[in-house]
Amino acid sequence: MEDKIHVRASSSEYDVIIGAGILSDTGSIVKGVLPNALKVLVVSDTNVAPLYMKTVTDSLEAGGFDVYEYVFEAGERSKNITTVAGMWDAMAREGFTRSDAVLALGGGVAGDMAGFAAATFLRGISVVQVPTSLLAMVDSSVGGKTGIDLPAAKNQVGAFLQPSVVIEDTDCLKTLSPELFTEGMGEVIKYAFIMDIPLYERLKAIADSGNASSLASDTEELTEVVKACVADKADVIASDEFDTGRRQILNFGHTAGHVIESLSDYTLMHGVCVAKGMGIFIDSCVAAGLCESEEADKMKSLIEAYGLPSGDDITSDKLTAGAMNDKKKRGNTLSLILVNKIGHAEIVKMNEDEYLAFLSRRGI
Ligand SMILES: NC(=O)c1ccc[n+]([C@@H]2O[C@H](COP(=O)([O-])OP(=O)(O)OC[C@H]3O[C@@H](n4cnc5c(N)ncnc54)[C@H](O)[C@@H]3O)[C@@H](O)[C@H]2O)c1
Ligand SMILES: [Zn+2]
Protein backbone atom coordinates (compact mmCIF):
# COMPACT_ATOMS: atom_id res chain seq x y z
CA MET A 1 0.00 0.00 0.00
CA GLU A 2 1.31 3.38 -0.90
CA ASP A 3 -0.03 6.85 -0.44
CA LYS A 4 0.60 10.07 -2.28
CA ILE A 5 0.81 13.54 -0.83
CA HIS A 6 0.77 16.30 -3.40
CA VAL A 7 3.03 19.29 -2.81
CA ARG A 8 1.89 22.49 -4.48
CA ALA A 9 4.83 24.89 -4.33
CA SER A 10 4.65 28.09 -6.34
CA SER A 11 7.58 27.04 -8.54
CA SER A 12 6.40 23.45 -9.21
CA GLU A 13 4.14 20.62 -8.07
CA TYR A 14 5.10 17.06 -7.21
CA ASP A 15 4.09 13.96 -5.29
CA VAL A 16 5.60 12.48 -2.17
CA ILE A 17 4.94 8.74 -2.44
CA ILE A 18 5.00 6.97 0.91
CA GLY A 19 4.75 3.24 1.60
CA ALA A 20 6.54 0.16 2.87
CA GLY A 21 8.63 -1.65 0.26
CA ILE A 22 8.29 0.87 -2.57
CA LEU A 23 12.03 1.26 -3.16
CA SER A 24 11.87 -1.42 -5.86
CA ASP A 25 9.33 0.72 -7.75
CA THR A 26 11.85 3.57 -8.09
CA GLY A 27 12.49 2.95 -11.81
CA SER A 28 8.84 3.07 -12.85
CA ILE A 29 8.09 6.06 -10.62
CA VAL A 30 11.02 8.06 -12.04
CA LYS A 31 10.07 7.06 -15.59
CA GLY A 32 6.56 8.37 -14.91
CA VAL A 33 7.69 11.83 -13.81
CA LEU A 34 10.80 12.21 -16.02
CA PRO A 35 9.93 10.44 -19.28
CA ASN A 36 12.72 12.22 -21.21
CA ALA A 37 15.56 11.42 -18.81
CA LEU A 38 18.09 8.89 -20.07
CA LYS A 39 20.74 9.02 -17.34
CA VAL A 40 20.46 9.06 -13.56
CA LEU A 41 23.28 9.72 -11.08
CA VAL A 42 22.44 7.99 -7.80
CA VAL A 43 24.10 9.81 -4.90
CA SER A 44 24.42 7.94 -1.63
CA ASP A 45 26.74 7.58 1.37
CA THR A 46 28.94 4.76 2.63
CA ASN A 47 26.33 3.57 5.17
CA VAL A 48 23.25 3.66 2.98
CA ALA A 49 24.74 2.45 -0.34
CA PRO A 50 25.52 -1.10 0.89
CA LEU A 51 21.94 -1.41 2.17
CA TYR A 52 19.83 0.07 -0.62
CA MET A 53 21.91 1.04 -3.68
CA LYS A 54 21.40 -2.24 -5.51
CA THR A 55 17.59 -2.24 -5.16
CA VAL A 56 17.48 1.30 -6.54
CA THR A 57 19.93 0.84 -9.41
CA ASP A 58 18.35 -2.49 -10.46
CA SER A 59 14.96 -0.83 -10.53
CA LEU A 60 16.23 2.18 -12.52
CA GLU A 61 17.97 -0.11 -15.01
CA ALA A 62 14.81 -2.14 -15.41
CA GLY A 63 13.09 1.19 -16.15
CA GLY A 64 15.53 1.69 -19.04
CA PHE A 65 17.85 4.32 -17.51
CA ASP A 66 21.64 4.45 -17.75
CA VAL A 67 22.61 4.49 -14.09
CA TYR A 68 25.74 5.93 -12.46
CA GLU A 69 26.67 5.74 -8.77
CA TYR A 70 28.33 8.38 -6.62
CA VAL A 71 29.07 7.29 -3.05
CA PHE A 72 30.58 9.68 -0.48
CA GLU A 73 31.85 9.14 3.07
CA ALA A 74 28.83 9.22 5.41
CA GLY A 75 28.52 12.21 7.71
CA GLU A 76 27.94 15.95 7.84
CA ARG A 77 31.67 16.58 7.24
CA SER A 78 31.23 15.45 3.63
CA LYS A 79 28.61 18.15 3.00
CA ASN A 80 31.03 20.47 1.21
CA ILE A 81 31.91 21.82 -2.21
CA THR A 82 34.52 19.08 -2.88
CA THR A 83 31.90 16.33 -2.68
CA VAL A 84 29.52 18.30 -4.88
CA ALA A 85 32.30 18.97 -7.39
CA GLY A 86 32.78 15.21 -7.59
CA MET A 87 29.13 14.91 -8.66
CA TRP A 88 29.48 17.68 -11.27
CA ASP A 89 32.60 15.94 -12.67
CA ALA A 90 30.88 12.56 -12.82
CA MET A 91 27.93 14.04 -14.72
CA ALA A 92 30.16 15.99 -17.11
CA ARG A 93 32.27 12.90 -17.79
CA GLU A 94 29.22 10.79 -18.58
CA GLY A 95 27.67 13.42 -20.84
CA PHE A 96 24.60 14.28 -18.73
CA THR A 97 22.23 16.72 -20.42
CA ARG A 98 19.54 19.02 -19.05
CA SER A 99 16.92 16.28 -19.34
CA ASP A 100 18.87 13.86 -17.11
CA ALA A 101 18.58 13.61 -13.34
CA VAL A 102 20.25 13.18 -9.97
CA LEU A 103 18.69 10.85 -7.39
CA ALA A 104 19.49 11.32 -3.69
CA LEU A 105 19.43 8.06 -1.74
CA GLY A 106 20.09 8.60 1.95
CA GLY A 107 19.66 11.05 4.79
CA GLY A 108 19.54 14.83 4.70
CA VAL A 109 23.22 15.12 3.84
CA ALA A 110 22.82 13.12 0.61
CA GLY A 111 19.58 14.97 -0.15
CA ASP A 112 20.95 18.47 0.40
CA MET A 113 24.11 17.84 -1.63
CA ALA A 114 22.51 15.92 -4.50
CA GLY A 115 19.85 18.63 -4.69
CA PHE A 116 22.51 21.34 -4.82
CA ALA A 117 24.50 19.48 -7.50
CA ALA A 118 21.31 19.17 -9.56
CA ALA A 119 20.36 22.82 -9.00
CA THR A 120 23.73 23.99 -10.32
CA PHE A 121 24.78 21.48 -12.99
CA LEU A 122 24.00 22.97 -16.43
CA ARG A 123 22.15 25.70 -14.44
CA GLY A 124 19.67 23.18 -13.17
CA ILE A 125 18.62 19.60 -13.88
CA SER A 126 16.03 17.45 -12.12
CA VAL A 127 16.43 15.84 -8.74
CA VAL A 128 14.55 12.90 -7.24
CA GLN A 129 14.63 12.56 -3.46
CA VAL A 130 14.68 9.07 -1.92
CA PRO A 131 15.11 9.78 1.80
CA THR A 132 16.09 6.90 4.10
CA SER A 133 16.42 8.58 7.53
CA LEU A 134 13.40 9.66 9.56
CA LEU A 135 14.63 13.26 9.58
CA ALA A 136 14.99 13.26 5.80
CA MET A 137 11.55 11.66 5.27
CA VAL A 138 9.65 14.13 7.44
CA ASP A 139 11.71 17.23 6.79
CA SER A 140 14.69 17.69 4.48
CA SER A 141 13.53 15.81 1.36
CA VAL A 142 10.38 17.91 0.97
CA GLY A 143 10.43 21.63 0.32
CA GLY A 144 13.32 22.21 -2.05
CA LYS A 145 16.04 23.60 0.20
CA THR A 146 19.42 22.28 -0.95
CA GLY A 147 22.95 23.22 -0.04
CA ILE A 148 26.31 22.64 1.59
CA ASP A 149 28.21 23.77 4.70
CA LEU A 150 31.14 26.17 4.87
CA PRO A 151 33.89 25.81 7.50
CA ALA A 152 32.41 28.88 9.22
CA ALA A 153 28.82 27.68 9.44
CA LYS A 154 26.30 25.09 8.27
CA ASN A 155 24.04 25.46 5.21
CA GLN A 156 25.68 28.74 4.13
CA VAL A 157 25.57 28.08 0.39
CA GLY A 158 22.59 26.65 -1.42
CA ALA A 159 19.69 26.95 -3.80
CA PHE A 160 15.99 26.19 -3.94
CA LEU A 161 15.17 23.21 -6.16
CA GLN A 162 11.94 21.32 -5.68
CA PRO A 163 12.30 17.59 -6.43
CA SER A 164 10.42 15.98 -9.34
CA VAL A 165 9.15 13.32 -6.97
CA VAL A 166 9.95 12.08 -3.45
CA ILE A 167 9.93 8.32 -2.82
CA GLU A 168 9.70 7.34 0.86
CA ASP A 169 10.02 3.63 1.64
CA THR A 170 9.28 3.36 5.34
CA ASP A 171 10.87 -0.11 5.41
CA CYS A 172 14.22 1.69 5.16
CA LEU A 173 13.70 3.03 8.68
CA LYS A 174 14.21 -0.48 10.06
CA THR A 175 17.98 -0.23 9.61
CA LEU A 176 18.25 3.18 11.32
CA SER A 177 20.05 3.15 14.69
CA PRO A 178 17.85 3.85 17.74
CA GLU A 179 19.70 7.17 18.27
CA LEU A 180 18.98 8.34 14.72
CA PHE A 181 15.37 7.26 15.01
CA THR A 182 14.94 9.14 18.29
CA GLU A 183 16.46 12.32 16.92
CA GLY A 184 14.08 12.19 13.95
CA MET A 185 11.24 12.04 16.47
CA GLY A 186 12.30 15.52 17.63
CA GLU A 187 11.16 16.91 14.27
CA VAL A 188 8.05 14.71 14.24
CA ILE A 189 6.95 16.06 17.64
CA LYS A 190 7.65 19.57 16.38
CA TYR A 191 4.97 19.20 13.68
CA ALA A 192 2.47 18.01 16.28
CA PHE A 193 3.13 21.07 18.43
CA ILE A 194 3.19 23.74 15.73
CA MET A 195 0.18 22.65 13.66
CA ASP A 196 -1.16 19.13 14.08
CA ILE A 197 -3.47 18.21 16.97
CA PRO A 198 -4.44 14.79 15.47
CA LEU A 199 -0.72 13.93 15.21
CA TYR A 200 -0.27 14.99 18.84
CA GLU A 201 -3.18 12.74 19.85
CA ARG A 202 -1.73 9.85 17.85
CA LEU A 203 1.74 10.22 19.37
CA LYS A 204 0.26 10.57 22.84
CA ALA A 205 -1.88 7.44 22.39
CA ILE A 206 1.17 5.47 21.27
CA ALA A 207 3.13 6.71 24.29
CA ASP A 208 0.22 6.13 26.71
CA SER A 209 -0.06 2.53 25.61
CA GLY A 210 3.64 2.02 26.33
CA ASN A 211 4.61 1.70 22.67
CA ALA A 212 6.77 4.80 22.12
CA SER A 213 9.97 2.79 22.19
CA SER A 214 8.66 0.24 19.71
CA LEU A 215 7.31 2.74 17.16
CA ALA A 216 10.47 2.23 15.09
CA SER A 217 9.51 -1.37 14.38
CA ASP A 218 5.79 -0.76 13.82
CA THR A 219 5.92 0.03 10.11
CA GLU A 220 2.17 0.52 9.73
CA GLU A 221 1.88 3.07 12.56
CA LEU A 222 5.14 4.72 11.54
CA THR A 223 3.94 5.14 7.96
CA GLU A 224 0.90 7.02 9.27
CA VAL A 225 3.13 9.27 11.38
CA VAL A 226 5.45 10.01 8.43
CA LYS A 227 2.45 10.78 6.20
CA ALA A 228 1.08 13.25 8.74
CA CYS A 229 4.40 15.10 8.94
CA VAL A 230 4.83 15.24 5.16
CA ALA A 231 1.27 16.55 4.78
CA ASP A 232 2.09 19.26 7.34
CA LYS A 233 5.27 20.24 5.57
CA ALA A 234 3.45 20.26 2.21
CA ASP A 235 0.84 22.57 3.70
CA VAL A 236 3.49 25.00 4.93
CA ILE A 237 5.43 24.92 1.63
CA ALA A 238 2.25 25.64 -0.33
CA SER A 239 1.77 28.88 1.57
CA ASP A 240 5.40 30.04 1.76
CA GLU A 241 7.88 28.21 -0.50
CA PHE A 242 10.73 30.68 -0.05
CA ASP A 243 10.68 31.00 3.73
CA THR A 244 9.70 34.63 4.10
CA GLY A 245 6.68 34.12 6.34
CA ARG A 246 4.74 31.11 7.59
CA ARG A 247 7.49 28.58 6.74
CA GLN A 248 9.37 30.00 9.71
CA ILE A 249 7.08 28.08 12.08
CA LEU A 250 9.12 24.99 11.13
CA ASN A 251 11.92 26.60 13.14
CA PHE A 252 10.16 25.92 16.46
CA GLY A 253 12.86 24.65 18.81
CA HIS A 254 15.60 25.60 16.34
CA THR A 255 16.61 29.09 17.53
CA ALA A 256 17.78 27.77 20.90
CA GLY A 257 18.51 24.30 19.49
CA HIS A 258 21.01 25.57 16.89
CA VAL A 259 22.99 27.40 19.56
CA ILE A 260 23.21 24.29 21.75
CA GLU A 261 24.14 22.19 18.71
CA SER A 262 26.89 24.53 17.62
CA LEU A 263 28.31 25.02 21.15
CA SER A 264 28.57 21.22 21.41
CA ASP A 265 30.69 21.34 18.24
CA TYR A 266 27.99 19.24 16.61
CA THR A 267 28.60 16.31 18.96
CA LEU A 268 24.94 16.56 20.02
CA MET A 269 22.43 15.43 17.40
CA HIS A 270 20.26 18.01 15.65
CA GLY A 271 16.90 16.49 16.65
CA VAL A 272 18.03 16.21 20.27
CA CYS A 273 18.95 19.90 20.28
CA VAL A 274 15.60 20.80 18.70
CA ALA A 275 13.88 18.94 21.57
CA LYS A 276 15.93 20.91 24.12
CA GLY A 277 15.16 24.13 22.24
CA MET A 278 11.41 23.42 22.29
CA GLY A 279 11.60 22.73 26.04
CA ILE A 280 13.47 25.98 26.71
CA PHE A 281 10.85 28.03 24.84
CA ILE A 282 8.00 26.19 26.55
CA ASP A 283 9.53 27.01 29.96
CA SER A 284 10.10 30.64 28.96
CA CYS A 285 6.51 31.00 27.79
CA VAL A 286 5.18 29.57 31.06
CA ALA A 287 7.40 31.95 33.04
CA ALA A 288 6.15 34.86 30.94
CA GLY A 289 2.54 33.88 31.62
CA LEU A 290 1.90 33.12 27.94
CA CYS A 291 1.39 29.36 28.31
CA GLU A 292 -0.63 27.43 30.91
CA SER A 293 1.60 25.10 32.90
CA GLU A 294 -0.79 22.22 32.21
CA GLU A 295 -0.31 22.68 28.45
CA ALA A 296 3.45 22.94 28.95
CA ASP A 297 3.49 19.72 30.97
CA LYS A 298 1.64 17.92 28.17
CA MET A 299 4.24 19.04 25.63
CA LYS A 300 7.25 18.25 27.79
CA SER A 301 5.85 14.81 28.72
CA LEU A 302 5.46 13.93 25.04
CA ILE A 303 9.05 14.97 24.27
CA GLU A 304 10.31 12.83 27.16
CA ALA A 305 8.08 9.87 26.28
CA TYR A 306 10.01 9.52 23.03
CA GLY A 307 13.37 9.48 24.79
CA LEU A 308 14.28 13.11 24.15
CA PRO A 309 15.40 15.84 26.60
CA SER A 310 12.87 18.60 27.26
CA GLY A 311 15.31 21.24 28.42
CA ASP A 312 18.91 22.26 29.00
CA ASP A 313 20.76 24.27 31.66
CA ILE A 314 22.50 26.55 29.14
CA THR A 315 22.41 30.18 30.29
CA SER A 316 20.18 32.80 28.71
CA ASP A 317 23.29 34.90 27.92
CA LYS A 318 24.79 32.14 25.81
CA LEU A 319 21.49 31.44 24.07
CA THR A 320 21.06 35.12 23.23
CA ALA A 321 24.61 35.67 21.99
CA GLY A 322 24.38 32.55 19.83
CA ALA A 323 21.02 33.53 18.36
CA MET A 324 22.31 36.98 17.40
CA ASN A 325 25.01 35.27 15.33
CA ASP A 326 22.52 33.01 13.65
CA LYS A 327 21.60 33.61 10.03
CA LYS A 328 17.89 33.81 10.80
CA LYS A 329 18.17 37.21 12.38
CA ARG A 330 16.87 40.04 10.21
CA GLY A 331 18.74 43.16 11.19
CA ASN A 332 18.65 43.23 14.94
CA THR A 333 15.35 41.44 15.24
CA LEU A 334 14.84 37.75 15.89
CA SER A 335 11.80 35.91 14.53
CA LEU A 336 10.88 33.50 17.29
CA ILE A 337 8.38 30.67 17.12
CA LEU A 338 6.23 30.19 20.20
CA VAL A 339 3.72 27.43 20.90
CA ASN A 340 1.42 28.25 23.78
CA LYS A 341 -1.30 25.85 22.76
CA ILE A 342 -0.67 22.49 21.14
CA GLY A 343 -1.33 22.74 17.41
CA HIS A 344 -0.83 26.51 17.14
CA ALA A 345 2.45 28.30 16.48
CA GLU A 346 2.96 32.04 16.42
CA ILE A 347 5.80 34.12 15.06
CA VAL A 348 6.95 36.79 17.49
CA LYS A 349 9.63 39.41 16.83
CA MET A 350 12.02 40.33 19.62
CA ASN A 351 15.19 42.38 19.75
CA GLU A 352 18.27 41.18 21.64
CA ASP A 353 17.26 42.71 24.98
CA GLU A 354 13.71 41.41 24.77
CA TYR A 355 14.94 37.91 23.92
CA LEU A 356 17.37 37.89 26.84
CA ALA A 357 14.62 39.03 29.20
CA PHE A 358 12.23 36.40 27.81
CA LEU A 359 14.71 33.57 28.39
CA SER A 360 15.95 34.88 31.75
CA ARG A 361 12.51 34.45 33.30
CA ARG A 362 13.38 30.73 33.47
CA GLY A 363 15.88 31.70 36.17
CA ILE A 364 19.00 30.55 34.28
N1 LIG B 1 16.91 20.78 3.18
C1 LIG B 1 16.23 20.91 4.29
O1 LIG B 1 15.12 21.46 4.32
C2 LIG B 1 16.79 20.33 5.55
C3 LIG B 1 15.99 20.24 6.69
C4 LIG B 1 16.51 19.64 7.82
C5 LIG B 1 17.82 19.15 7.80
N2 LIG B 1 18.58 19.27 6.69
C6 LIG B 1 19.95 18.74 6.64
O2 LIG B 1 19.87 17.33 6.79
C7 LIG B 1 21.07 16.86 7.37
C8 LIG B 1 20.72 15.91 8.48
O3 LIG B 1 20.01 14.82 7.95
P1 LIG B 1 20.21 13.34 8.51
O4 LIG B 1 20.02 13.33 9.97
O5 LIG B 1 19.40 12.44 7.67
O6 LIG B 1 21.79 13.14 8.27
P2 LIG B 1 22.61 12.09 7.41
O7 LIG B 1 22.27 12.18 5.98
O8 LIG B 1 24.04 12.26 7.77
O9 LIG B 1 22.11 10.71 7.98
C9 LIG B 1 22.38 10.37 9.31
C10 LIG B 1 23.09 9.02 9.37
O10 LIG B 1 22.12 8.00 9.12
C11 LIG B 1 22.63 7.09 8.15
N3 LIG B 1 21.43 6.54 7.50
C12 LIG B 1 20.51 7.19 6.77
N4 LIG B 1 19.52 6.38 6.43
C13 LIG B 1 19.80 5.18 6.98
C14 LIG B 1 19.13 3.93 7.01
N5 LIG B 1 17.94 3.76 6.43
N6 LIG B 1 19.73 2.90 7.66
C15 LIG B 1 20.91 3.08 8.29
N7 LIG B 1 21.58 4.23 8.31
C16 LIG B 1 21.03 5.27 7.66
C17 LIG B 1 23.53 7.93 7.30
O11 LIG B 1 24.46 7.16 6.62
C18 LIG B 1 24.19 8.83 8.34
O12 LIG B 1 25.27 8.16 8.93
C19 LIG B 1 21.83 18.07 7.83
O13 LIG B 1 22.89 18.33 6.94
C20 LIG B 1 20.82 19.20 7.78
O14 LIG B 1 21.39 20.45 7.52
C21 LIG B 1 18.08 19.84 5.57
ZN1 LIG C 1 15.54 20.62 12.10
Image (cartoon, helix red, strand yellow):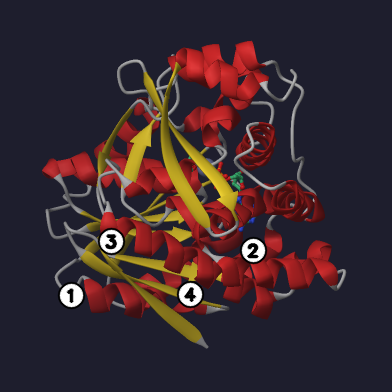
Q: Which mark is residue 133?
A: none
Residue assigned mark 3? 238
**Which of marks 2 and 1 precedes in the sequence?**
1
Residue that appears at 31% across and 51% down: 144
Residue assigned mark 2? 173
Give above or below for 67 relative to 76: below
Determine whether the beta carbon of the residue marked 2 sits less than 8 angstroms from the nearest atom of ligand 1: yes
**Which of marks 4 and 3 precedes in the sequence?**
4
Q: Which mark is residue 35?
A: 1
Question: The residue under label 4 is which amino acid type?
Answer: Ile
Question: The residue under label 1 is which amino acid type?
Answer: Pro
**Which of marks 2 and 4 precedes in the sequence?**
4
- Disc 2 from disc 3: Cα separation: 27 Å
Find numbered disc 2 in the image and state the secondary structure of the residue it sits on.
helix
Residue at the far front in the pictured view: 289
**Which of marks 3 and 1 precedes in the sequence?**
1
**Which of marks 1 and 4 precedes in the sequence?**
4
Find numbered disc 1 in the image and state the secondary structure of the residue it sits on.
loop
Q: Give the image location of residue 231, x and y in percent.
A: 43, 68
Give above or below for 297 relative to 84: below
Contact (Cβ within 8 Å) of mark 1 with mark 2: no
